[in-house]
Image (tube, rainbow, N blue to C red):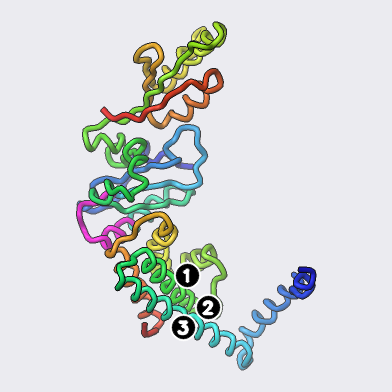
Amino acid sequence: MNNLKNNSPKKEEIVEDKKTVAKSKTTPGIIEVTDFKAEKSKILEKTAKEYFDSADEDFGKGRYNSAVVLYFKSLVALADLFVLHETGDTPSSHNERFRITQEQFQEVYELLDKDFPFYQNSYFQIMSKELAEVIKNDAEIMAGKTKVKL
Amino acid sequence: MMQKLWLEKLKLNYSKDVLDIVQFGSSVIEGSSPRDLDIAVIFQKIPLKEQLNQSQEIKKQLQKLTELPIHINSLDLYSLFESSNFAREGLLLYGKSLLSKNYFANKFGLNPRIQIFYSLKDLKKKDKIKFNYLLNGRKGKYGLLRKHGGKLLKPGLIEIFPEYKDTFVSSLKIITSNLEIRNIFY
């Protein structure tokens, strides 16, 4: 436990890391940053597809609650990918995601804001086939915006 | 901060698919400090996708009127009465229509009320008097019944508006815990 504590980066170090990234972003030609963005982009695309495929599987089996959750997760990954393409960074929480999209990408915000309550309620509410189809459709819209082939 | 939206003169744009727009949840309970406003939009039977899109438009209009975040629910008459809709009772008992300014239940010809049965049997005389003052007032001061529009139906039974349930129960409980509460529609 103590070792873990000692190995974890200090607050100042984290801040310093962020500063470096922020500086690099504005300096063209720094390969590290390009790689970092490309890597993040690749991960988001992969997770979006993975969630979407799993959602399709669950949908096919009539597991609509799982399908709703997974389609929504796919939608979120694609929304993050969109934000990454547009701003060079990704949100780190739902709150930040909502804030950024509301301020800058209203159409994306609308999709997230509309579907988020179902994701939240999926633990205790029965989700319908029709709802799963709606959220699937929204993930597909987002895929279109990010030019990802699901 | 605007909280009781059903009391306001609202200029809302909505389609003919909308049967009602209802505020419910903690924000309609008297004396509460809600963290958000629960709104249900009740639709004719139209596709869910259409319901959700229209609800978003209504949400945008309502959000301009309050600083509290609005949680919007889209329902049609089928999903409203489904057993999986846990908001069903709250909507019918407490729900206030932003369109008619009355209880949402009125739409179905129902008046929601709460009946509180109480017994003063084992109380000391001074507590019985205190209880009576609490309900009926004293020396020109209004009691809970007059203040909040409740009625004494018979000794041991009062009927009140649902949104005042917590107000009544918390006050009465100080004197007696011998209370039985029933939600009724007539």
Label 1 and label 3: CA atoms lie apart by 25 Å
Tag 1: Cα neighbours inside 10 Å, few (<14), some, or many (≥20)? some
Q: Which mark is residue A87?
A: 2
In the rendered image, the quadrant that contains the C terminus of chain A is bottom left
The residue range painted magenta reads B42-55
Q: Mark 3 or mark 2: which is in front?
A: 3
Q: Secondary structure at mark 1?
A: helix
> In this rendering, is residue B140 above or below A95?
above
Are tags 3 and 2 found on a single chain?
yes
Chain letter of disc 2? Answer: A
Q: Position of residue B69 (x, y in %)?
A: 46, 51
Residue at the image point whose x is 75% and y is 72% from the top: A4
> In this rendering, is residue A64 above or below B63?
below
Label 3 and label 2: CA atoms lie apart by 20 Å
In the rendered image, the quadrant that contains the N terminus of chain A is bottom right
Tag 2: Cα neighbours inside 10 Å, few (<14), some, or many (≥20)? few
Q: Nearer the viewer, residue A53 or A96?
A: A53
Badge 1 is on which residue?
Answer: A104
Q: Which mark is residue A46?
A: 3
Are tags 1 and 2 found on a single chain?
yes
| Callout 2 amino acid | Thr
CB-based contact (under 8 Å), mark 1 and mark 2: yes
Residue at the image point whose x is 51% and y is 83% from the top: A43
Q: Is residue B1 left or right of residue B163?
A: right
| Callout 3 amino acid | Lys
Residue at the image point whose x is 41% and y is 81% from the top: A49
Q: Nearer the viewer, residue A100 or B135?
A: B135
